[in-house]
Image: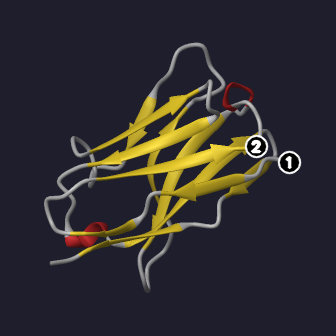
């Protein structure tokens, strides 16, 4: 079992920045992959960014809509995954969820609300 706790959401103006954090209850390097998803009202949950945390060489994935604006990173010492979000747009408004994946298991955090509005 892995517990994931997100933090860092809030209200920000268009063009602003936020950094989301996801603290894991075990070593991230032992988890196959970590990712951030988001779900806007009336829409399906979508993958935003992912990283193969269990590998010695990291590869990242970004949805086209966030490429060049968002960055996923991790701190193994803190067992924490981050999502740095820059140049935020109103369409980035959603609940953001942290995900950890192991073989046969998906773990989810409780979600953190991000609202981009003037």
Q: Secondary structure at mark 2?
A: loop
Q: Quadrant of the C terminus?
A: bottom left
* Residue 58 position in % (x across, y down): 50, 21
Asked if 96 appears above or below 72 in the picture, the reply is: below
Residue 19 position within the rendered picture, expressed as x and y whole percent measured from the top left: 37, 49
Mark 2 → mark 1, Cα distance in angstroms = 9 Å
**Vertical order, 108 against 111 (above or below):** above
The answer to which image quadrant residue 43 occupies is bottom left
Label 2, on which residue? 25
Name the residue that disc number 1 marks.
1
| 10 Å crowding of disc 2: few (<14), some (14-19), many (20+) | some
Left or right: 106 as drawn, with respect to 72 = right
Q: Does 112 sit left or right of 56 as displayed? A: left
113 is higher (above) or lower (below) than 86: below
The location of residue 111, given as percent across then percent down, is 57, 66
Residue under the point 79% across and 39% down: 103
The residue positioned 68% from the left and 52% from the top of the image is 4
From the image, state whether disc 2 or disc 1 is nearer to you. Answer: 2
Residue 58 as seen in the image, left or right of residue 29 = left
Instruction: Give the residue furthest to the top.
Output: 56
Q: Earlier in the sequence, mark 2 or mark 1?
A: 1
Q: Residues at badges 2 and 1 in contact (C-beta under 8 Å)?
A: yes
State the image coordinates of residue 115 (x, y, percent, origin top left): 32, 73
Please tell me in which quadrant of the rendered image residue 108 appears. Answer: bottom right
Q: Residues within 10 Å of mark 1 (few under 14, many from 20)?
A: few
Indicate the secondary structure of the residue bearing disc 1: loop
> Which residue lies at the image location 60% right of the left edge and 29% below the top edge?
53
Specify how the rendered protein is coloured: secondary structure
């Amino acid at each position: 079992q892995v517990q994931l706790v997100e933090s860092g959401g809030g209200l920000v103006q268009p063009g602003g920045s936020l950094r989301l954090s996801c603290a894991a209850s075990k070593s991230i390097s032992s988890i196959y992959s970590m990712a951030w998803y988001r779900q806007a009202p009336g829409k399906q949950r979508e993958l935003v960014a992912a990283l193969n945390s269990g590998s010695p060489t990291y590869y990242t994935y970004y949805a086209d809509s966030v490429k060049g604006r968002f960055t996923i990173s991790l701190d193994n010492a803190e067992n924490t995954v981050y999502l740095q979000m820059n140049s935020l747009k109103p369409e980035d408004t959603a609940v953001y969820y942290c995900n950890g994946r192991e073989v046969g298991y998906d773990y989810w955090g409780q979600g953190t609300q991000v609202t981009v509005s003037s």
